[in-house]
Image: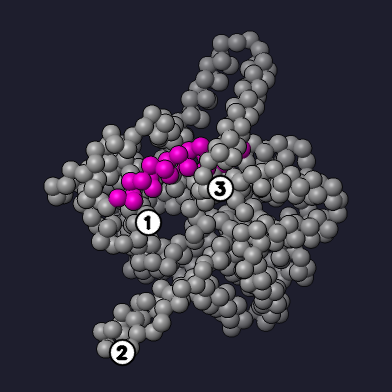
Amino acid sequence: MLFPAPIFLFLFLPVTLLLVYLTRQSRFRNGLLVVLSLLFYIFGEADFVLMLMGSVVVNYFLGKWVDKCKNNAAITVGVAVNLLFLVANKYLGFLTENLNFVLQGLHVHPLNVPHLKLPVGISFYTFHSISYLMDVYRKENKAQKSFTQLALYITLFPQLVAGPIIRYKDIASQFTSRVLTSSRFKIGIERFIIGLGKKVIIANTLGISTDLLFSLHPNQLSTASAWFAIICYTLQLYFDFSGYSDMAIGLAKMLGFDFMENFNFPYISRSVREFWRRWHISLSNWFRNYLYIPLGGNRVGKARVYLNLFIVFFLTGLWHGASWNFVIWGLLHGFFMVIERLGFDKILERSGRVVKHFYTLFAVVIAWVFFRIDKLDDALAFLKTLFGIGNNPGYTLSFFTTKENVIVLVLAILLAINGVNRLLKGGIKMLYNSVSSIEAVKVSFRNVKSVALSLIFVYAVLNVVYGTYNPFIYFRF
């Protein structure tokens, strides 16, 4: 089930909120949310709901075992079970294809390549399960005695299929101590509407241009058209995923939970290192806490640190998809992280703000080419077109631009660099300095904000009702 879908907006969500707010005791409320979360998952992935519940059951008993044994063998088995579960469902075909490539060189008969349907959300709920086991192993939490509470942590529908990836220790206390209030509900509604607007109004509009442009071979595009394509995709991906995260955080707030922020204006970063402190923050934290630090982090020699970074970003790329283009994307980010540590960061410090931003955006945007295009030959051909290599003028930019997508693109750029917030803050500051009643300004701002959010919601819903199906990009991971 999609958040920006009529059945979710006008049936599932209202019924869920009504039932949750009518249920007083937290233990009954937790059980209710587990049932509702499973119904949410069944609506789109009925074939895999037993697999999801199987994962919960297995990790419930693994957690007790890890807590009891408190040794490396127990946690190794626990993590291995979850990773084998993920590999079998997500990477088996990819591994078989690559093994067949080796077997072909040895003149050995190839294996049959399995083509399995990827269960939606498996990468996310597997990482949640590993987080639970690791936090128990590190004695940051005791093993969960309540099966319902563990099931709720893994299956809670706002974060089930596309995150944010919430560490178990950060949310464990909320299963019994969360409070539902009108102020939290209001904040949640506002956050949800902002996310809905990001997805439906901005990401989906940019997605129309992106899909059209990337459906053509790179040789059919002019250099300007290629840059328009990758810029549209760069912004589409951000507003698509950050929009989902905003909706998830807003829904969680309405249900009494506090989720961590997942994005913090990543496109204003001045280094690739800073970019990863702002982009998909929950995933970055997960890899840092459960892989990079256990590998030695920054406490080992420089050569080992660089190797650790490449391992982390190799696996970050592979986590996003069973394809070499994602691995290349991850390794590119690992490369930039390493060269910054090798001394390029010192050069950046002496550079101006514009140079830092240009370098970071250039690195990120070029890497997105491999994230978007799965065939290596096509990705390299697209890069050639970006830099005007060859003599293929292709379709001109005017062929792809309309008044609507240009307006949305400009709005997306302003929002992505925090320009709208800065303009609003500047305007409010000027009003504060020019009027005698500060309270009147605050009331006026709240009224304008309420009207703006109402208009965004109505326009987004109209797009949902009359628009086309457009799933979240990160559902595929």
Q: Amino acid at mark 1?
A: Phe
Task: Look at 33% across and 50% down and name the residue there.
Answer: 214
Q: Which residue is mark 2?
A: 108
**Which marked residue is nearer to the observer: mark 3 or mark 2?**
2
Range shown magenta: 193-216
Q: Which residue is mark 3?
A: 244
Q: Is residue 423 above or below residue 334?
A: above
- Of mark 3 and mark 2, the one earlier in the sequence is 2
Please state which of residues 261 and 376 is positioned toward the viewer in this rendering: 376
Q: Which residue is mark 1?
A: 371
Q: Looking at this rendering, what residue extends furthest in the left direction?
A: 391
Q: Is residue 300 above or below residue 386?
A: below
464 on left or right of 311: right
Q: Is residue 190 above or below residue 32?
A: above
Q: Amino acid at mark 2?
A: Val
Q: Amino acid at mark 3?
A: Tyr
Q: CA distance from mark 1 to mark 3?
A: 19 Å
